[in-house]
Amino acid sequence: MAHLETDKFIQRYSQSYPPQKTYYLLNHDPLHTTCTPDFRTSRTDLLIAHSENKKKHFEFTQALLSEFVTVLALEKPLSLYNYSIELAAQSLEHGQDRQRGVDILITNSQQKIMLGIDIKLGKNSSNLNFNGGHWLDHLKAPFINLTLGNWRPDIKDWLKNAVKPNIKKNGSIPDIPQLRKFAISRITNSLMIQYSMLMGRSPRLFIPETRKDYQVYRQKLEGLIDLFTQVESL
């Protein structure tokens, strides 16, 4: 049974990286993303090795798990408002044209990219409950960091002692509701700070060059703030 449950967890993770997927930017311009077979296989093999207590690329595998559990924590509340959260494809995770990559995407029901998130296991030194971010031109969407170390300083221990056993048990991961609450609050605050900086034309924020992109940036931030404010009140 344990092996069967492990297979379910691993299969769901592997299916999070489809070979091809299309998103839509401005004027419904398509953005085609890809994941190579080697990419999917190597990441799946890392989780399998991790579940078997092998120390192969341990830190990197913990980072992969942190991204996946963040998706698992947020997917249900976001789906109530017809939004999706998913792991970013290989071609987006690695970035392009000097644009930084992202770990996670939030999309609406039309498969338009609304937000890119970069998961960090470290801790932001600021005591304020938010992370920085800016506009990503190649995604035509806002971006934020999410430092899980600000949820709990022993985040790596939690990944090892609470998340890792779930690969075998496929049961309820302890403290997922608390992770969800933290992530929603921090994302909301990060978006609100970014919106305030955009409205104030802060020199610390990368502001789109064109009027159209500026309007899209503002509108997406407004929509996301409204979304996460509603999710936070659930």
Image (cartoon, grey):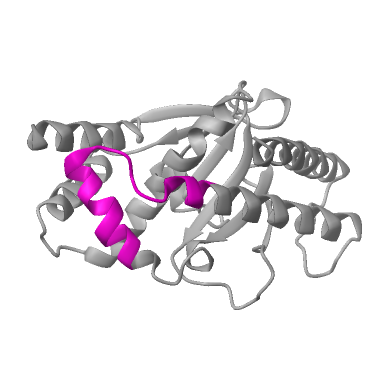
Placement of 195 over or under 32, stated as above or below: below
Horizontal and vertical percent position of residue 186: 63, 56
Boundaries of the magenta span? 157-180
Placement of 188 over or under 24, stated as above or below: below
Relative horizontal placement of residue 76, taking residue 193 as reference (left or right): left
Residue that lies at the very extreme toward the bottom in this rendered image = 125
Q: Which residue is drawn at 66% across and 75% down?
A: 127
Number of numbered discs visible in the structure rendering: 0
Horizontal and vertical percent position of residue 102: 51, 51
Q: Quadrant of the C terminus?
A: top right
Can residue 84 be spotted in the picture? no
Q: In which quarter of the image is residue 162?
A: bottom left
Q: Which residue is drawn at 71% across and 40% down?
A: 224
Relative horizontal placement of residue 101, taking residue 215 as reference (left or right): left
Q: Which residue is drawn at 80% across and 40% down?
A: 222
Q: In which quarter of the image is the N terminus?
A: top left
Horizontal and vertical percent position of residue 61: 27, 58
Q: In which quarter of the image is residue 33?
A: top left
**Residue 179 lies in magenta, yes or no?**
yes
**Residue 138 lies in magenta, yes or no?**
no
Q: Magenta region's main secondary structure?
A: helix
Task: Depth check: give the residue in front, 174 or 214.
Answer: 174
Residue that lies at the very extreme toward the right in this rendered image = 200
Placement of 27 over or under 85, stated as above or below: above
Can residue 131 be spotted in the picture? yes
Q: In which quarter of the image is residue 3?
A: top left
Relative horizontal placement of residue 223, taking residue 81 as reference (left or right): right
Q: Which residue is drawn at 75% across and 61% down?
A: 206
Horizontal and vertical percent position of residue 126: 65, 76
Task: Depth check: give the residue in front, 212 or 172.
Answer: 172
